[in-house]
Amino acid sequence: MKNTISERIADFLKNYPPFNAMESEQLEKLSIEVVIIHKETNTIVFSQNENPHDHFYVVNKGAVSLSKVGSSQILDICDEGDVFGLRPLLAQEKYKLEAKAYEETILYAIPIKEFKPLALENKRIGNFLIESFASNTGNPYSIKHRGKLYGINEDAERYSTNKILDLQPIKYSKDLITCAENASIKEIADIMTKHNVSSILVEKEQLPVGIITDKDLRKKVATGQYPITESARTIMSSPIITYPKELTLAQSQMAMMKSNISHLVLTEDGTTDTPAVGILSKHDIMVAVGNNPAVLLRAIKRAATAKRLRSIRHGTMNLLQGYLEQNIPLGLVSKIISELNDASTKQVIQLALAKMEREPPVKFTWLSMGSQGRGEQLLNTDQDNAIIFEDVADEKLEETRSYFLKLGERISKSLNTIGFEYCPANMMASNPSWCQSLSEWKKITAHWIHNPGPDEILLSSIFFDYSVVFGEKFLADELSHSIFGHANRYPQFFTHLASGALQNPSPSGFFRDFLVEQDGEHKDFFDLKLRALMPIIDAARVLILSHSIKSINNTAGRYEKLAELEPNNKELYLACSYASKALLKFRTRQGLLHNDSGRYIALDKLNKEEKIKLKRTFKTIKEIQSLIEVRFQVKNLLR
């Protein structure tokens, strides 16, 4: 049986030196030994002065920066097909530079033990290695890198001198001052005074369980609410909100504003299940603050009208434009813009509630679905939303629905005012079909699952891509639990969902030409959403749901989780993750350029490089669709 992963590796390597000098049999043999490595942005591949690894590296997707430790100057950037980390192995010396993932990257690790005999046999490979030593570059055949490994090229200079401050890791205090739960308030005050700190971390079995700040001492002790003989657990804030130590300035500001807190506890993995490694105060952030998303978030929360939110939205688009120009990793950009979008929606809802004649009759949840639900809505695309409200007696149902429909209309109108178009299919909370009680939603979604026609598949699938922007999360959780329960009791649903994921038209024709629209308003344009983005989004959804994973909505995140769950398909899933980000980034750039949704692309306006980058994703799309077709036996369904 053929090893499809090694075949895929060989197909890639044969296009780049020195592997293009190998015989097919040699390359196939070597590819079997290659290890696929996934690196998140800013993670280290190897460190300066580290002993050489037993393999060197080829960039499959993404980019790796090479630099001297302690210097902000990037000496070289290796991208697709570039070789690096080879010279120290052959010279038997330590690494002279630090290699770090410049963006999310997939690497092929080539074992030197398997490669070296081939280099001795093959004169062309030997010449490549000689030139590598002579030119100080990992790939002398790469024109843009040739001879520049220890100099500053134009790109390196641009990136090293024009970084966006708020996306750099935030500096935090590593000198933690801690106490036990049973420590008295007097002891705590003495410790804080002695160390001149504004907070103290409360730990239990070396794990963080609470935090006490100056504010707690003022409000809870100085006012006489609690005596100084009470214990820490009496006045501590708990449970605490924790974040991973790799937090950026922008993320830390937004985290504090989102939760209305003045201190963040940083742990090894961002949860309370690992020891604390540092603490970050609002003062720390103010020291480092510059012009960043937190300013926009603060303005959003203070906005009193939809028109004011619209002007702030322009600022968000300017921020997005700047991030793309700086080539900031799209995963981080998406998180920041999504936070700002959610904050805008939340403020719109609060303003709409304030204008209602009375308080909501029951608890409710506002769901943002589609691209916003997946955290992928970067441009001003159309709305997809719904309301779930608590069950009421039959005689009060229509009266209750009438209230929430009126609320939904006001919210949808204001969202349109700030820049989010109305949904062409009317999938909005202002539509009675999308404003239902919890019991009604359960019945509707159960019907969709057990009667999966094309329309039902489309409607049910969007309920797997939602985020709770406002209201009671338990309502959404209960509905989600019901949907998954029905889906698991009716496994054939996943086959229908898979069939729906294969309905979008192919992005390319027989000769790999772009398939464009044949008629209508967008004749001769390429539909980036329908032909490229949706197939890869739909595939991620059905695959992750088949594993009963319901906590990940983002497309790239779903593929990364799938890579963990199915190691045999790891390379394909990581390629899909990369492709989903590349396509979203491409659409965003096009949308900002033409001041539209970026959906329809005029191919004659693209340069050759842009067309090549787009076509690279088409192969990945076809591969993931083939996997779905086989796994879910879609052909049998169509017979």
Image: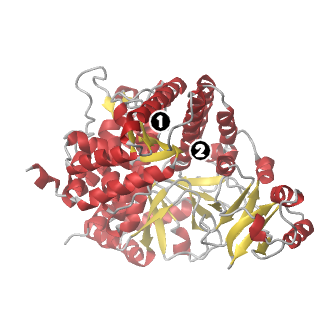
Q: Tag 1, which secondary structure?
A: helix
Residue under label 1: 588
Residue 541: which numbered mark, if any? none
| Outermost residue to the front | 395
Given residues 63 and 251, the one toward you in this image is 251
State which quarter of the image contains the N terminus. bottom left
Q: Amino acid at mark 1?
A: Thr
Q: Dot 1, crowdedness within 10 Å: few (<14), some or many (≥20)? A: many
Disc 2 and disc 1 in contact, CB within 8 angstroms: no
Q: Which residue is at a point 49% across and 43% down the rendered structure image?
A: 364
| Outermost residue to the top | 521
Horizontal and vertical percent position of residue 612: 37, 41
Residue under label 2: 155
From the viewer's perspective, tell me whether residue 556 is left or right of residue 341: left
Observer-side mark, 2 or 1, equals: 1
Q: Amino acid at mark 2?
A: Asp
Horizontal and vertical percent position of residue 37: 45, 66
Q: Above or below — where is 37 with respect to 153?
A: below
Q: Which residue is at a point 74% across and 42% down the rendered structure image?
A: 290
Q: Report if residue 13 is visible in the image.
A: no
Horizontal and vertical percent position of residue 97: 63, 64
Horizontal and vertical percent position of residue 102: 56, 54
Q: Report if residue 597 is visible in the image.
A: yes
Quadrant hosting residue 2: bottom left
Given residues 96 and 303, the one toward you in this image is 303
